[in-house]
Image: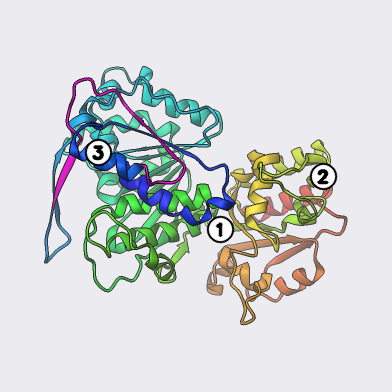
Amino acid sequence: GINFLTHFTSNYIDNTASLPNVTVEFHTAFNTEDDYGEILQKHLSTLPKVTTHCFDNSKNAATGHCVVLTSSVSSERTFFTHRGAMNHLNPAPLSPPTTASHFHLTGLMNMTLVLDTLRSSPSTSPILLTLKSHHSNGRTTSLVPQFSPNPSDYSLISHLLPYTTYLILSENEATSIASSITKTSEDYVKFFTENVEYTIVTKGSLGACIIKRNSGIILTSSSPLIHSVVDSTGAGDAFAAGFLKSIKMEEKDMLESLRIGCAYGGAACMKLGATVALERVNELMKTVDVSLESSSFKDSGKEVFCVFDFDQTLTCVETSEFHFSSDNKVASVNQVFGSQHRMNMIVEMLKELKGKGCRISILSNNSSFVIRKCLRKLCPEAESCFERILGFEDVQCNNLGMPCSKSVSILDIIGRNSSNSSGRSVIFIDDNRTNIRDVQKIEGGVETKLIERGGMDEADIQEIIDWAGQQLNT
């Protein structure tokens, strides 16, 4: 937990001015009076915007510690772990603030009492109730179970999966959990596709992948290019911190967050011990190749993409015309989306397209940060419908440092291999004639729809839904 927290907070130490409302509450267990405990307290006091809550340690157990033996000729590691105070971590007092936007649980396999409550009375387990409360109220959650020497413990995770937004684990752990719960040796991809919203699996030198519920593998990545691995201890924690920081703090999309997670995991392998070579992260990000997979469309045999502009297409007016204040942006439904009725139509359209199996994205000249804030403030149901949200800061730039045209950027969404165009249908919706003409030049064919009336109306919405249905049935 402290390892994850160190990487997570170090990621945004230099950005706290632009994230004034960010705070982290850290719940853990260690002995505040022994030598290791004092080291941890001193370290935690240096982390920005972190409040530490240490559970009661009336049994005076020692602070947990671990000896790691690493091989100089292979990547093998052996752990000798003394859990100490963690064995007595009582989950009952755990009560994160109701205003928290995200709840992260790490090191579950090292929490003896937590596992005992899941084993004896899962429906009333405090940790399950905490996850359920956050998830049911529209907030995101994440779980990093880590390794267990007792394989039967993995089956206890099944109680938490329905309330987990992001499950982050190694490939060995993924295989162990799937086989422990199903009692078979079935492919873990199939299991997590059926049971978890998003599963992020790290594969060491083979990179990582993201599995989405009801869709299968949607993203795969290579590992960053590292000439010499010094020590991989803590790489998983660094990956999780980089990924969650990107998707929750910087509000980037899944693809970019996977790239950042891999870069942080790689940077952790370049130093001895569970530390990250932060100065190498940007360099490593450039060596991570992330690709979209099409497994979610195996049933229909065809991929259907709907790519929307944002300003004056999904919205009625330019969001950039408004000042968004630091308290999560000042805007109103009437200002940005028009009437409540129109906003409801937009949301229902997105849900219907997603339900049909369409891959929906936003490609805008506005900022993806502003777009995400606007969606979360005004119609949070809509954000989850988008596979990707790309703004000017997310697309390739030309030689002058300006964002490339939409005909270039859209290929990052639909894929650059034109030989697959026969199994792919794409529609691009924008209010700008220049962008429409530009995208029409793409080899392989992209259908376009020009919005001329300052935002889609009911007829436009129905036309797009009908088009999607026709493509999926072709």
Question: Under tag 1, what secondary structure?
Answer: loop
Q: Residue at x 82, y 41 (%)?
A: 334
Residue for badge 3: 38
Q: Is residue 221 left or right of residue 19?
A: left
Q: Classify 10 Å Cα crowding around label 2: few (below 14), some (14-19), many (20 and above).
A: some
Please state, as top left, top right, bottom left or bottom right, where the N terminus lies in the image. top left
Residue for badge 1: 302
Question: Under tag 3, what secondary structure?
Answer: helix
- Assess whether mark 3 and mark 2 are in contact (beta carbons under 8 angstroms): no
Q: Which callout, 1 or 3, points at the residue further toward the start of the chain?
A: 3
Residue for badge 2: 335
Between label 2 and label 3, give the one nearer the viewer: 3
In three-dimensional space, the C-alpha distance between marks 2 and 1, rounded to whole angstroms, equals 38 Å
Q: Is residue 369 left or right of residue 8?
A: right
Query: Tag 3: residue type?
Result: Glu
Numbered label attached to residue 9: none
